Amino acid sequence: MCAIWGSTWLVIKVGLAGAPPGTALGVRFLLAAVIILAIVRVRRIPIPRSRHLWTLSAFLGAFHMALPYSLVYHAEQHLSSGLTAVLYTSMPLMVALLARAVLGTPLTVPKLAGIGLGILGVTVIFSDSIQVSGASQVGGVAAVLLSVFFASLCAVVVKKHGGRYHPVVALLGPFAIGGALVTLVAAGVEHSNPLHYDLRTWATILYLAGAGSVVAFTLFFWILKRVDVTVASYQTFIIPVVAVILGSLFLSEPVSVRLVAGGLLILVAIALATLVRSREPR
């Protein structure tokens, strides 16, 4: 999951050269919904006709797919990818707090220490690109943090209410609804025709729809059934490391001492948060 989502930053960067962000995102989610529907039909996975499933799907489509991704795409027009990555590492802390309030998940000292160390690790990696100046960048920071909140809330909601459904079935509605919402808004703002995109742009959209959406989100929902939701959110520490490594391999970006030091801090952070047992009473 982290390997796939770590690669999506590179692919999005390539794809945005040929398509505006809203249209590209909307088409990505709609294609993902078509792929999910094909999987459901081929494997004959039953789709429950329950109000609970479609209420959950509508909520996730709006607040897990459409809104957080749109906010991040908007923010990256004003912020560096490094600052965006650092801001997104607040997600484990947000998830931990929401999981404590909604699920009653223990908030232990090792878990909090690991989250803090993980944030430090990502900050070390991108320490040369963390700058905020001007109202547009302040707005970008606010957009990323709002995206983090909704993504964290939805992760907790999936943990609480999505476990009864097959991961593929649970994604069909969110992709379809999220894709429709983003596409409708983009159609009125960007006026872009996907039929005019070149082959490279379509290749990025197909990769993001198939691997970046269907495969990665299915893995994420499958993982949420089996581990603490805060542990699952530690992906936000690992994904930037993968992105930097891929940037080095394919874009000839340098591998710095900061990457090595920050990566080691992240590994220690995850070990501390997941392996060390707290002696405090729950």
Image (cartoon, helix red, strand yellow):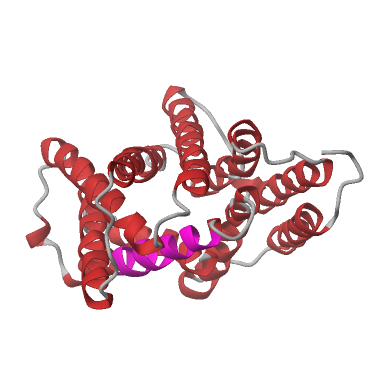
Residue 188 drawn at (x, y percent): 11, 36
What main secondary structure does the magenta stretch of the protein show? Answer: helix
Residue 127 drawn at (x, y percent): 66, 46
Image quarter where the C terminus lies is top right
Give whichever of 34, 90 is nearer the camera.
34
Span shown in magenta: 207-223
Q: Can you name the residue that lies furthest to the top here?
A: 135
Query: Is residue 118 shown above or below 47?
Result: above
Query: Is residue 241 shown above or below 153?
Result: below
**Can residue 20 be seen here?**
no
User: How many marks are shown on the rendered structure?
Assistant: 0
Q: Is residue 12 left or right of residue 141?
A: left
Residue at 52% x, 69% y: name it: 3
Residue at 86% x, 52% y: name it: 277
Q: Is residue 255 left or right of residue 170?
A: right
Give whichever of 163, 173 is nearer the camera.
163
**Can residue 271 be seen here?**
yes
Residue 44 drawn at (x, y percent): 25, 73
Q: Is residue 220 magenta?
A: yes
Q: Is residue 219 left or right of residue 234?
A: left
Query: Is residue 61 shown above or below 36?
Result: above
Residue 206 drawn at (x, y percent): 26, 68
Q: Is residue 280 magenta?
A: no
Residue at 32% x, 47% y: name it: 53
Res 102 → quadrant: top right
